[in-house]
Image: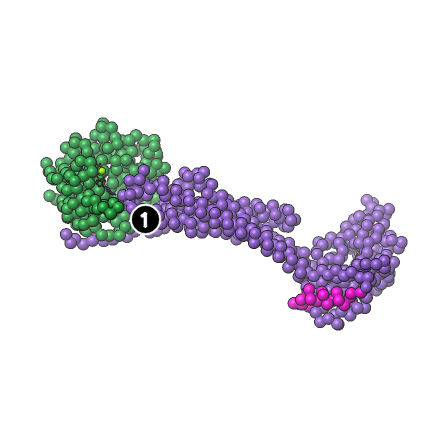
Chain colours: A green, B purple
Amino acid sequence: MGVVVLELADVSKVYRQAERVVPVLQDISFSVARGELCALVGPSGSGKTSLLNLIGLLDRPSAGTLAIDGARVTDCSAAAAARLRNRLIGFVFQSFHLLPRLTAWQNVALPLQYRGVPRARQRAQAEAMLARLGLADRSTHLPGQLSGGQNQRVAIARALIGSPRLLLADEPTGSLDSATGREVMALLAALHAELGLTIVIVTHDQQVAAACPRRIALRDGRLAGSADE
Amino acid sequence: MTAPRPAVWNPPPIALRLGDTLAEGWRNLRAQGRRSALALLGIVIGTAAIIAMLNSGHMAQRAALKLFAKLGVDMLQIQAASTGAAPAQLSRAAIEALPRHDRAVLQAVPLAIGRSAVRAHGLTADLATLAAPPALGALARLPIAAGRALRAIDDCTLATVLGAGAARALSAPAGAIAPGDTVLIGQYGYTVIGVLAPVAIETLDPVDYNLAALLPPGCAARVIPGGGPNALLVRLRDGAQGDAVGQRLIARFAAPGLSLTLLDARTILRTMQQQRAIQSRMLTAIGAVSLLVGGIGVMNVMLMSVMERRREIGLRAAIGATPADIGLLFLVEAMLLSAAGGVIGAALGGGIAYAIARGAGWTFALAPWTLALGPGAAGTIGLVFGLYPAIGAAGLAPIEALRAD
Ligand SMILES: Nc1ncnc2c1ncn2[C@@H]1O[C@H](COP(=O)(O)OP(=O)(O)OP(=O)(O)O)[C@@H](O)[C@H]1O
Ligand SMILES: [Mg+2]
């Protein structure tokens, strides 16, 4: 295993629901090395999204620690977590989460805005990134004017624009038809190969999971196995 | 695992992000369109009322002072009317002695006021006749356009000075009335020795000088019944209490068969100011209530906006917006929204002030600072009422916000 990008040690998560404590993740420990492409698999309700939210610093573990690039990131303030997300993590969501009033390039440039990149440079960088993903002629389109596959590519461009250490994708093909889904997966695989990007993909799709060199399986909030090929 | 924490990354300069935030806020407001416009109504009415109030107050003040520009505010006028058959008469000697008897009186000018038909060149004008000592010319700053003013030596002569309008009314197409011409006042032929330039009429002017024939006081009985003074103009010493002195003078001149009326510049001004204060208190109340309602409207719009845009908030948080960034975005939107209402309100308020000025016959003038006050006050309202929704937006947990539908 190469340089460790992500390390989880005894991570647990409980949700409190009206007096009741619901354990969602229990004693999860694993690490991901730079350049790995991992599939996070498991039945519905097994805690995949909850785990991805912890890795993405969108939520905090109830117990255990997380480190990214060897630095502990578990107990920082909300503002510090936001800045770490901006610097270290790129998100791709099942439902794209593009802002409908912003054009493709404006959506892609959003992470740069929160870094204080001057606006002229934001546009140049965003358009370059869109061009790399084959959307050069769509940069001034609104999300409503683009197909699902194109929207997901815009979202991937947004996730990549800040050169993240870690790309997190929660069922990125979940709302696409199978052909388009395969295209998006091929794109992610190509980016992984080309840029040496570290990627964690949550998926239900057996084919998608099979295409990943490493699979991390969850069952009832526990690690059910971690298979490398 | 006891790895060091990552060095806290320095946030970018706020000025850079503020530019983006303003641009975004503006875009979002435009997208909201009609709903924003409705919320603005209160802000618009509020700022319009306050700006109209400030400006009409400002103009009324100037208009009121203009009514006392020539004579100043340290002036009294007493007019005597007869309640019987005999013409009202005051004692000339008593008037002339006033400055010696009352320390508050600087100068007292006796006036005999009447009305006569005046004829010349076959034309007739109904004019005020005013017999007064030469001191009046200086006191009332009567401007001579041609010829000369009345002097002490004119005392009982048949000499007159005509007002500008009077001279025009008596001028034949062939030739204007000029010094040296004769006019017939009542049964007497008077020689015109001077003509006045047009003058603006003020509150304490005893007659409209433009439509008057000024006569020497000596033998005024030829055209003014009684011939003696029936009014007086009093200049007070600086800081004298106008109404108190007025009451003293009324008591001094009171006599059977006489009804005395007091005009006191300061009292008139005060009455005008009181009326204006009532008006401006009303407008201020309307403005304040409207601004309050407007502020609540803005808060409502922003709360709805936060609700509707939870997914956007979650997304922004996911890609690196800090709670402060998100709060700022909504605060800026609230302020922009209110300030836009303030701009419209300022324009409307200026328009209302113009209408008020037209209606009251004042010269229209806007105090520029009041126009800046409109958007300023409205923006502050936006800041205050936008704070609560902005704090709510900033406090949303990213995963909850992302999950919202
Ligand atoms: N905010 C919450 N409060 C309470 N329980 C929650 C909360 N979020 C998730 N859960 C529960 O945690 C468990 C794991 O949910 P999670 O969304 O992580 O599953 P998942 O593996 O992503 O499922 P799916 O494949 O359907 O997306 C579920 O039982 C869910 O009901
Ligand atoms: Mg899930």
> Is residue B242 found inside the magenta-colored segment of the image?
yes
- Tell me the quadrant of ligand 2: top left
Q: Residue at x 32, y 38 (%)?
A: B405
Between B29 and A44, the one nearer to me in the picture: A44
- Is residue B398 shown left or right of residue B55? left
Residue B57 visible from this viewpoint: no
> Is residue B212 found inside the magenta-colored segment of the image?
no
What's drawn in magenta, residue-wise?
B235-255
Percent coordinates x, y for residue A206 in the rendering:
16, 31
User: Is A132 rendered above or below residue B164?
Assistant: above
Q: Quadrant of residue B255?
A: bottom right
Q: Which residue is drawn at 36% across and 40% down?
A: B308
Which SS class for mark 1?
A: loop
- Which residue bears the numbered disc 1? B395
Residue A28 visible from this viewpoint: yes
Between B75 and B35, the one nearer to me in the picture: B35
Q: What residue type is labelled 1?
A: Gly
| Label 1 CA crowd tier, 10 Å (few <14, some 14–19, many 20+) | some
